[in-house]
Amino acid sequence: MGRAVVLPLLLASLSMGAPAVMAQDARAAVEAFIARLPDVQISDLVIDQNLTLYYPDGQRQASLGEQRMFFKLPRRQRLEQTVEGQRVVQITVGDRVWVRRADGLVSELPAAGPVRALARLLVPGKRLATDLLAEWRARGVRDDVSHVARLGGRTVTVIGARAGERDVPAVWLDPDYGVVRIVTREQLPSGPGLLDLTLSEHRPLIGGLYFPYRQEVFAGGTLLILFTVRSVAINTNPADGLFEPASLRSR
């Protein structure tokens, strides 16, 4: 059950001695993307999606489930998840995480970086390129290294990796869609390794912002989870009580 709770949200090295032009290329790409979103105003999201959990071979489906995710930006999240009839609810407020498991037990969990970063990946909001680069740097992404690559038939800027590097933290930035892939080094159940989140099948959300309707999580190159979004609603003002840990104790 722990795998089902944590992995769906896993879901975005300091620079030393690289040519300045590489850092400028990364910053220019981020600044160009942010410049496309001057009028985007999003205070909250509600996402309904299906999820498929895979066996460790990455080929066979292990479990199917559904999720409803509430985000009240910038620091509150609620996950309601049902997998194989087992319902789990998880609330994140800032750096703290609480969960009510299927048996009704409520406990506080250590907060994970990818949990806190998920909303910022999906909705970048009004921030400076400096802020985004600093967040990625904190996750091990070298912002003084970048190159241009092709992904899904589109040209993207890969920040944190040189051409040919496959085993380092990196952010793949599409000029229209934003972050379409982020690779980080995490503590996985099997030990330290690379966690790879890819975002695709983007659809217009608001203004110049797109939302990924397909999200895949890989560990060491093996598919762990597939999310397929059914619907996204913005600015519906979910009740504050949904994000109160005390709500987990009420049935």
Image: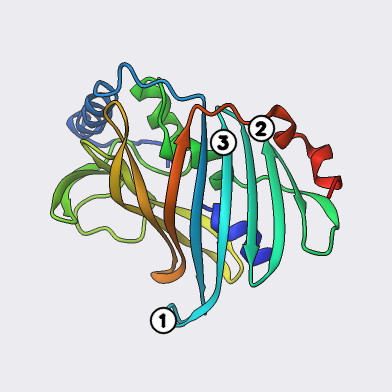
Q: Which residue is mark 1?
A: 59
Amino acid type assigned to the residue bearing label 3 in the image: Phe
Where is residue 17 drawn, in percent x and y?
29, 35
Report if residue 56 is visible in the image.
no
Q: Nearer the viewer, mark 3 or mark 1?
A: 3
Q: Which residue is mark 3?
A: 71
Dots 2, 1 in contact, CB < 8 A: no
Q: Is residue 224 above or below residue 206?
A: below
Q: Quadrant of residue 248?
A: top right
Residues at marks 2 and 1, CA–CA distance in whole angstroms: 35 Å
Amino acid type assigned to the residue bearing label 1 in the image: Gln
Where is residue 179 drawn, in percent x and y?
33, 42
Looking at the image, is mark 3 or mark 2 earlier in the sequence? 3
Q: Which residue is mark 2?
A: 94
Amino acid type assigned to the residue bearing label 2 in the image: Gly
Question: How is the model colour-coded?
Answer: rainbow
Looking at the image, is mark 2 or mark 1 earlier in the sequence? 1
Residues at marks 3 and 2, CA–CA distance in whole angstroms: 12 Å
SS label for mark 2: loop
